[in-house]
């Protein structure tokens, strides 16, 4: 009986460690996370994303702007994903090491590994660099989350990192975060 209890305890402990290591949200640097105001001139929070920013049209990134960055910010990172994708969460954009003085990303941000300001872009779920707009299958509208993080360091990642790489690099270094959610449903 003791061996059975010990084995069950070990299994539970290992399951907890594995689950803790797979967190989708990075931990904060200070235990307190400042709320950053993230907005777009193209759509309001919770509203439809205009078709030109989707894979069904021009497939360009929407303009984004933010305010209320916390003191001590050394860089920003942005992840855009769709948790409503059929198989698993689909990553549409990974961009990081944006300078601490940045307050916006322009419409149609170039799809290059490194921007002029030093920011680096990672791979989306299509294994391409830069923004990949919404293009869900016909049916219900999908939600697209633009998540901005203020970090207390540069990530140290080379261009071409994945969302998982970025989450790992950010863990324990988040000072603030903001979120903007837009929806998109293709015309049938």
Image: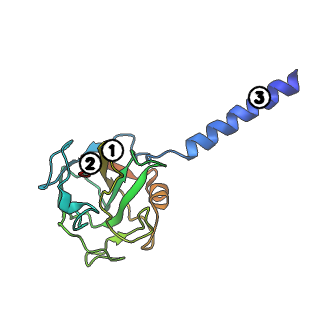
The residue indicated by pointer 2 is: 185
Left or right, 133 with reference to 48: right
Front residue (pair 95, 13): 95
Vertical arrangement, residue 54 with respect to residue 181, above or below:
below
> Where residue 13 appears, x then y in whole percent?
68, 35
Asked if one can make out residue 144 in the rendered structure from this viewpoint, the answer is yes
Residue at 36% x, 70% y is 121
Which of the 4 quarters of the picture holds residue 170?
Answer: bottom left
Question: Where does label 1 land, which residue?
Answer: 139
Gap in angstroms between the C-alphas marked 2 and 1: 7 Å
Q: Quadrant of residue 150?
A: bottom left
Give percent across and percent down for residue 65.
17, 57
Judged left or right of residue 63, residue 95 is: right
Q: In what element is the residue under mark 3?
A: helix
Q: Are marks 2 and 1 in contact (CB under 8 Å)?
A: yes
Dividing the picture into quarters, in which one does residue 105 lie? bottom left
């Amino acid at each position: 009986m003791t061996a059975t209890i010990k084995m069950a305890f070990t299994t539970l402990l290992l399951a907890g460690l594995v689950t803790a290591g797979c967190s989708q949200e990075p931990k904060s640097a200070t235990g307190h996370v400042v709320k950053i105001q993230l907005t777009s001139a193209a759509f309001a929070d919770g509203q439809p994303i205009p078709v030109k920013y989707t894979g069904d049209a021009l497939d360009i990134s929407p303009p984004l702007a933010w305010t209320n960055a916390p003191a001590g910010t050394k860089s920003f990172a942005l992840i855009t994903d769709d948790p409503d994708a059929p198989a698993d969460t689909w990553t549409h954009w990974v961009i990081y090491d944006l300078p601490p003085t940045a307050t916006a990303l322009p419409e149609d941000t170039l799809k290059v590994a490194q921007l002029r300001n030093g920011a680096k872009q990672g791979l989306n779920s299509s294994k391409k660099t830069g923004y990949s707009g919404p293009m869900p299958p016909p049916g219900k509208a999908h939600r697209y989350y633009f998540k901005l993080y203020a970090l207390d360091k540069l990530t140290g990642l080379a261009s071409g990192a994945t969302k998982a790489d970025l989450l790992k690099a950010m863990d324990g270094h988040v000072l603030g975060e903001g979120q903007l959610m837009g929806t998109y449903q293709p015309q049938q």
